Amino acid sequence: MELWQQMIRDSVHTVDHLVEKFEMDRGEAERLNEFFQVRINPYYLSLIRSKNDPIWLQCVPNIKELHDFDASDDPLMEDAMSPVPNITHRYPDRALFLTTSQCGLYCRFCTRKRKVGNSEKISMKGLEAAFKYLEKHTEIRDVIMSGGDPLMLTDMMLEKILKRLRLIPHIEIIRIGTKMPCVLPQRITPKLVDMLKKYHPIYINTHFNHPWEITEESSKACQMLADAGCPVGNQMVLMKGVNDNPFVVKELMQKLLKIRVRPYYIYMADETKGANHFRTSISKGLEIIEHLRGWTSGLAVPHFVIDAPGGGGKIPILPNYVLHLDDEKIVLRNYQHKVYTYKNVEEENPVLPAVKKKQNQPGRAIVRELTAPEAVTTPEPRKNPPVLAEA
Ligand SMILES: *Cc1c(COP(=O)(O)O)cnc(C)c1O
Ligand code: SF4
């Protein structure tokens, strides 16, 4: 057994553990454990500094989870957009592929609480149908392995999946969504990264939410992935009591860059049943982005998005930098609230068809409407490229 597997075994996971470690009421612990299972591995447990600190809140069950009666357990409509059990296909050219129900830690804010940790709901039996779907759908050029956490699979099983995906010619890139670098960095072993690099291009998306999660161990894990040629991105979820503070987020983003992880998304917390107590106001998110853009490296500024309830996908939200927009000019303000004007020019050959000018709508003069996604194609490469004059 590898060290990380032993650490999973040594996790806090029973009602007795909850009562002993966290002085929880037994009845409450039972109901919570039944609602969404508990797993706090010894590494992540060691990061807790005090009761209700940002690490504690992410992993220790809270009675508020059970008071969340009205919320949906699938606000993003992932199941409705699932053509076969382990696939969610929401966007034209990429698909989410659930490969396991297991995680190195069960996060109390998880958006997939309805399935994660339950091997009947995300089952290995579904893998074959998923491969068939991916093979048949030649428009899919990007597969995002998720779960659960794909790095809960053994190296051998993971390699089987990667090998199979690499046999599908239209799949250009593979992404692995994993919290392991953050919650159980011991999972990132030399053997794992040596295997991964045979299947490039592989992108890793990881999930750090607080600067205390950046430790010697997690730094090493991210650097090993980067050294193996995997670009590593981070998705952070904005959560009350965890990271709803511009200074905390800026510190996290800057520390991620130091360990070669590029901030990719900041999400508003989803309206998931049992996780609504983590939600913050939208203005809090905007305040955080305002505090990043311009004030620190652009590389440290992720896209701030809401994953739209109802399955609309990730929609970016920006502080309002555009004060005015018409056919002649755009008036902008910068990060310091100084105002600048940029002159517009007329577009002679718009790439996108069907330009519709919306009358009498300030700031909407140059809205262009896409008739259909198919209408936009890359131009064919030129048959006879011009011969360059010799120097
Ligand atoms: C997030 C997500 C993706 C990937 O979106 P990107 O913006 O390309 O990172 C794909 N499919 C589903 C269902 C998703 O939720
Ligand atoms: S690792 Fe991801 S899938 Fe697993 S519990 Fe945490 S957020 Fe949910």
Image (cartoon, rainbow, N blue to C red):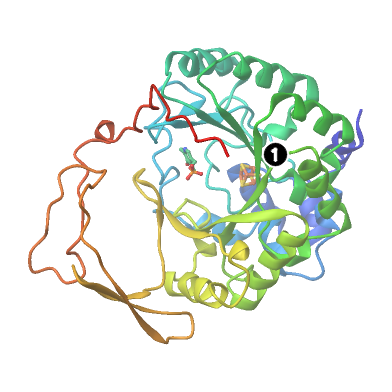
The image shows residue 118 at horizontal and vertical percentages of 61, 31
Q: Position of residue 266 (x, y in %)?
A: 54, 59
Looking at the picture, tell me which residue is in the foreground, 240 or 39. Answer: 240
**Type of amino acid under label 1:** Cys
**Image quadrant for the N terminus?**
top right
Q: Is residue 174 above or below residue 237?
A: above
Q: Choose between 4 and 384: the one closer to the eye.
A: 384
Q: Is residue 235 left or right of residue 351?
A: right
Which quarter of the rendering shows the C terminus? top right
Tag 1, which secondary structure?
Answer: loop
Whether residue 310 can be seen here? yes
The local crowd at label 1, few if under 14, some if 14 to 19, many if 20 or more residues have their Cα within 10 Å, is many
Residue drawn at x 58%, y 72% is 244
Q: Which residue is mark 1?
A: 103
Q: Quadrant of ligand 2?
A: top right
From the Cβ of disc 1, is ligand 2 less than 8 Å away? yes
Q: Residue at x 87, y 36 (%)?
A: 189
Instruction: Report the front residue among 218 and 67.
Output: 218
Residue 268 appears in the figure: no
Left or right: 62 in relation to 274? right
Q: Which residue corresponds to the image point at 74% horizontal and 41% vertical from the top-left?
A: 104
Q: Position of residue 83 (x, y in %)?
A: 40, 23
Residue located at (24% from left, 64% from top): 345
Q: Which residue sits furthest left?
A: 359
State the image coordinates of residue 311 (x, y, percent, origin top left): 36, 43
